[in-house]
Image (spheres, coloured by chain):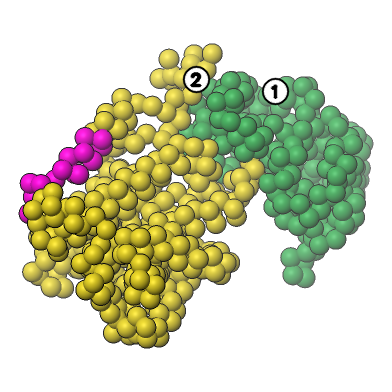
């Protein structure tokens, strides 16, 4: 007599639109200049990091400010794979994910003993310690960093085919490959988060976010859930970090473990777009990119404007820009809400 | 026997909040717990549910020693609870609150739980608001949701913590009728309550706690007539 529904017309339309956008995105390098591809690579990788942080904080209640540890360790593991093991950079990206996963185990072991703000600070401290340790690794350039060897960057798998297909130079072919990988990564990460939120684990995550004690009282294994989310997020962040530094081909501890670039901007994107929704980070990354492009020449005014924008959104639209849009229109592009349909329910027939 | 506590104690620092509590609850009984504020009533619930672990003593549930078992295991063994201050999952709808409890408390698939959740929502008069966000509910509806969510876990032992507190007389009557109906179906209930007329209209025995110790247990009339209880709990001079 009663039915559970999650599917909406907007959700179906979004799925079709995403499919069209991905196909168009794959073909885009044929018609756009290299600068646009580099900008899109930046947007896609920041969106991936934002979706992952949103999963951690917006759904799992784990407000980490140490995600740069996983970007950095992922990037350094990729470099180690290339320089020390002679791997192809694309294959070495997987090593980045594994290294981040391995780092996440001791990080969670210590950080999960802390709550709230202490957890946030704890993750930051662990990231700093990791940066200092990595800076001692002389084989990868120590404190000053290093670059991917010329023979490795000129021989990345797939770039020859891209050069032949689009008639571009080696560096541009490498950018196109990185862009395609970023596109694939953001689709997989967002798709997996969407699937997770629609599964019963999504309910458990929301319950833990809202009230840990009550979640335990209904049988949710809070500890195991937090571990799972933290490890998955770390591995995905490590893969993203490795990919980012395949594209730059140059690494240093300061760049790879930058709290501003890999955590502060990511938090800005999620907060301004709308925490706890898949749509929020998408809106947030577009606003962030627009501000970054518009204010690139204004030095410290850029950061001050970002700060003011974040404060304004937190004061006047605490659920972010997407929260504002959603409240006014009732629109959910990625519906995760379960609705009970049936007799005697308001709007349930 | 569904629950047996043997000499259970719990301290927070130097303060002993549960002091050698021993009680047996037969299957199908409704047991009321009363006592002044700070007597250790909610702590006793937390020890039964596993939200707190006992320092001493033994807790048996359905004949199994669960003294060190985590809260999650006890829920799956059939312990459902409500909280004194309602703690809904505010970002989820009323229905999703129940679905979470049903899916994890019983360990089944969501689709199999839908009709049962709808039935519980109807019993607790929340069906109409099934798709409303829990964070936007009134106090009465939050209390109803506490009860409904506990029921959704499929409890054999239902622990109710001051569920009638703060309600009007009419709201309280409606809630008592719902609790009576649940009890009539065979669910064992342990109910902490200060609204004594509501409590005594449901329970078969009353247990009185003071400074973490059991100072009386028995039929409600006999307990309420006890001079010691009247002095400690009701503040009447004897």
Q: Give the image location of residue A78, x and y in percent.
A: 36, 68
Q: Residues within 10 Å of mark 1 (few under 14, many from 20)?
A: some
Q: Give the image location of residue B69, x and y in percent.
A: 76, 52
**Location of the C terminus of chain A (image quadrant):** top left
- On whether residue A336 falls in the magenta region, the answer is no
**Which residue is under mark 1?**
B177
Question: Which of A74/A155 is in front?
Answer: A155
**Placement of A110 over or under A235, stated as above or below:** below
Question: Chain A appears in which tint?
Answer: yellow
**Placement of A68 over or under A316, stated as above or below:** below
**Residue stretch in magenta:** A18-33
Q: Main secondary structure of the magenta part?
A: helix
Question: Chain B appears in which tint?
Answer: green
Q: On the picture, is A138 further left or further right than A102?
A: left
Residue visible at 20% across and 44% down in the picture? A26
**Which residue is under mark 2?**
A3
Secondary element type, mark 1? helix
């Amino acid at each position: 007599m009663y039915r559970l529904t999650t599917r909406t017309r907007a959700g179906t339309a979004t799925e079709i639109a995403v499919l069209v956008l991905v196909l168009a995105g794959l073909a885009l390098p044929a018609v756009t200049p290299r600068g646009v591809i580099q900008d899109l690579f930046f947007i896609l990788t920041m969106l991936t990091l934002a979706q992952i942080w949103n999963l951690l904080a917006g759904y799992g209640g784990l407000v980490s400010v140490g995600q740069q540890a996983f970007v950095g360790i992922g990037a350094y593991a990729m470099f180690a794979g290339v320089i020390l093991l002679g791997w192809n950079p694309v294959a070495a990206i997987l090593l980045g994910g594994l290294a981040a996963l391995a780092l996440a185990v001791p990080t969670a072991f210590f950080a999960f003993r802390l709550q709230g703000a202490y957890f946030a600070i704890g993750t930051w401290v662990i990231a700093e310690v990791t940066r200092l340790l990595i800076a001692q690794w002389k084989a990868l350039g120590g404190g000053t960093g290093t670059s991917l060897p010329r023979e490795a960057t000129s021989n990345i798998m797939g770039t020859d085919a891209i050069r032949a297909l689009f008639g571009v130079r080696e560096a541009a072919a490498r950018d196109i490959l990185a862009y395609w990988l970023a596109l694939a990564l953001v689709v997989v990460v967002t798709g997996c988060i969407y699937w997770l939120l629609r599964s019963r684990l999504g309910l458990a995550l929301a319950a833990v976010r809202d009230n840990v004690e009550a979640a335990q009282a209904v049988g949710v294994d809070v500890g195991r859930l937090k571990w799972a989310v933290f490890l998955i997020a770390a591995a995905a962040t490590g893969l993203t970090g490795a990919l980012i530094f395949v594209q730059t081909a140059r690494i240093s501890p300061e760049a790879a473990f930058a709290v501003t670039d890999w955590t502060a901007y990511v938090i800005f994107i999620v907060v301004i777009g709308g925490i706890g929704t898949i749509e929020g980070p998408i809106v947030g990354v577009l606003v962030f990119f627009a501000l970054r492009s518009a204010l690139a020449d204004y030095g410290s005014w850029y950061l001050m404007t970002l700060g003011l924008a974040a404060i304004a959104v937190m004061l006047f639209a605490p659920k972010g820009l997407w929260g504002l849009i959603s409240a006014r229109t009732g629109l959910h592009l990625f519906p995760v809400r379960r609705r009970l349909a049936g007799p005697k329910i308001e709007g349930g027939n | 026997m569904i629950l047996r506590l043997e000499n259970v104690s719990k301290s927070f620092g130097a303060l002993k909040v549960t002091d050698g509590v021993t009680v047996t609850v037969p299957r199908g009984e409704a047991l009321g717990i009363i006592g002044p504020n700070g007597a250790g009533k909610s702590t006793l619930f937390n020890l039964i549910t596993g939200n707190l672990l006992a320092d001493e003593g033994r807790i048996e549930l359905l004949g199994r020693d669960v003294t060190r078992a985590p809260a999650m295991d006890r829920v799956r063994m059939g312990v459902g609870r409500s909280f004194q201050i309602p703690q809904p999952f505010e970002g989820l709808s009323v229905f999703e609150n129940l679905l979470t409890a049903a899916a994890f408390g019983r360990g089944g698939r969501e689709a199999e739980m839908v009709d049962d959740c709808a039935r519980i929502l109807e019993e607790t008069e929340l069906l109409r608001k099934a798709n409303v966000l829990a964070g936007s509910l009134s106090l009465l509806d939050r209390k109803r949701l506490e009860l409904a969510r506990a029921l959704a876990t499929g409890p054999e032992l239902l622990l109710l913590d001051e569920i009638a507190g703060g309600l009007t007389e009419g709201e309280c009557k409606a809630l008592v009728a719902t609790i009576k109906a649940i009890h009539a179906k065979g669910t064992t209930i342990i109910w902490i309550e200060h609204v004594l007329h509501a409590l005594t209209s449901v329970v078969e025995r009353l247990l009185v706690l003071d400074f973490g110790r059991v100072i009386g247990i028995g039929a409600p009339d006999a307990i309420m007539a006890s001079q010691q209880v009247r002095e400690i709990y009701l503040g009447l001079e004897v």
